[in-house]
Image: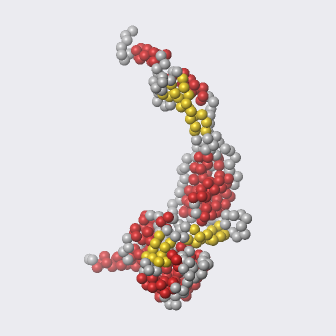
Amino acid sequence: MRFGPKSPLTVLFMVNILVEGGITMSRRGDNIHKRKDGRWEARIIEKYTEEGKACYKSIYAKSYTEVKEKVKSHQKQEIKPKTITCKTVDEVCNEWLESISIRIKQSTYALYYRRIQEHIKPYFDNIKIEQVTSETINSYIKEKSENGRLDNKGGLSPKTINDIAGMLNQVMIYAQKKGYMSGYVPDLIKPKQEQQELIVLTKSEQKELVRYLQQDTDKIKLGVLISLYTGIRLGELCALKWSDIDIPNGTLKIDKTIQRIKNTDKYASSKTKIVIDKPKSQKSIRVIPIPSFLHEKLWNQRNRYWVNAYVLSGTYMYVEPRIYQKHFKRVLKEANIKEVNYHALRHTYATRAIESGIDVKTLSEILGHSNVKFTLERYVHSSIELKKESVERLAVSY
């Protein structure tokens, strides 16, 4: 039979020489290679950590064939990742929450805790985490969409459902990393969130409200004026002290907020508690310019109170948000303005700012939003007055 450089017999003959001579080259995917000292080295998994992470070690032999046999022998031992069984969804949720508690705000912790207790625990009662899949969570999402309210009056809002589903997804990823389960692939159905129409005072309503507020301006009225012309949140207003207001430079500093949250201490005598914490995000820590007319009112009030007194109370004791909300409702009634939520003042400020031509980036920084996109999508909406003015300008141009 003919031998040639590319004949089958020649190739077979050369392979036999290479293998028997101990100079076999490494093959792709083997994780085996020849060392400079002539030995062959293979990398194999020796064990898995509690978190499911593989720990490798090296084995050596004089030839490729010999080291390959050692690898096969080791693989027969069937080393598998450690799995810790008998963990329920509730147990893993609580463990996950504690693991992130050091890097989240008290209010965020309380919110997650409440959602676990009210929405997750009742549904997944005593179910093992290893039994939960994306399909399981999607069935849960569907049920919560139809009948998720605690008062049994319908489903939860898409935003609330998406927030809870996002929490569950984080819990599942955490469980997989810890070795409590395996094979979880995130594939969740997110309910569509429709943008709700924001409540904004009309220009005439705002004018009438300001007229009322400037008559015998007391601490309660002053707080409404501050919110209406700076756009700060209710919790930020309640935490505002006179020391945060720089009268000479005409600015106020926002670096804290007051909230009433669920008390997660099961031995506490009260179900809720007041916390004074950092604002909503890092961007919410900001300095805001004060309009000149408001600056004058603050100047007149400033010398009446101690520097560390709260603006709304004039004392060292704060006025909590839900109490001030009641004062605000009374103000609206006395001013003959329709009842709106306090946050409508923030929406109104944003709308008037855009109508006056302020650029969105500047407005976003004043409002303390995390990004400009959120300002555009959430707060900057065209009022009916602005639409009418635009239509009139268009008509005049023809």
Give the image location of residue 229, x and y in percent: 46, 79
Taking the spot 36% from the left edge, 78% from the top edge, the residue there is 389
Q: Residue furthest left?
A: 398
Q: Is residue 191 visible?
A: yes
Give the image location of residue 219, x and y in percent: 55, 84
Q: Is residue 141 visible?
A: no
Between residue 34 and residue 144, name the one nearer to us. Answer: 34
The N terminus: image quadrant = top left
Taking the spot 38% from the left edge, 77% from the top edge, the residue there is 356
Between residue 191 and residue 53, name the one nearer to us. Answer: 53
Give the image location of residue 138, x and y in percent: 58, 53
Taking the spot 27% from the left edge, 77% from the top edge, the residue there is 397
Q: Is residue 156 left or right of residue 265?
A: left
Taking the spot 59% from the left edge, 56% from the top edge, the residue there is 100
Marker count (numbered): 0
Q: Residue furthest bottom?
A: 216
Q: How is the image coloured?
A: secondary structure
Between residue 241 and residue 184, name the one nearer to us. Answer: 241
Q: Is residue 134 above or below residue 25?
A: below
- The quadrant in which residue 81 appears is top right
Q: Is residue 287 above or below residue 144?
A: below
- The quadrant in which residue 58 appears is top right
Between residue 142 and residue 49, name the one nearer to us. Answer: 49
Give the image location of residue 7, x and y in percent: 38, 16
The C terminus: image quadrant = bottom left
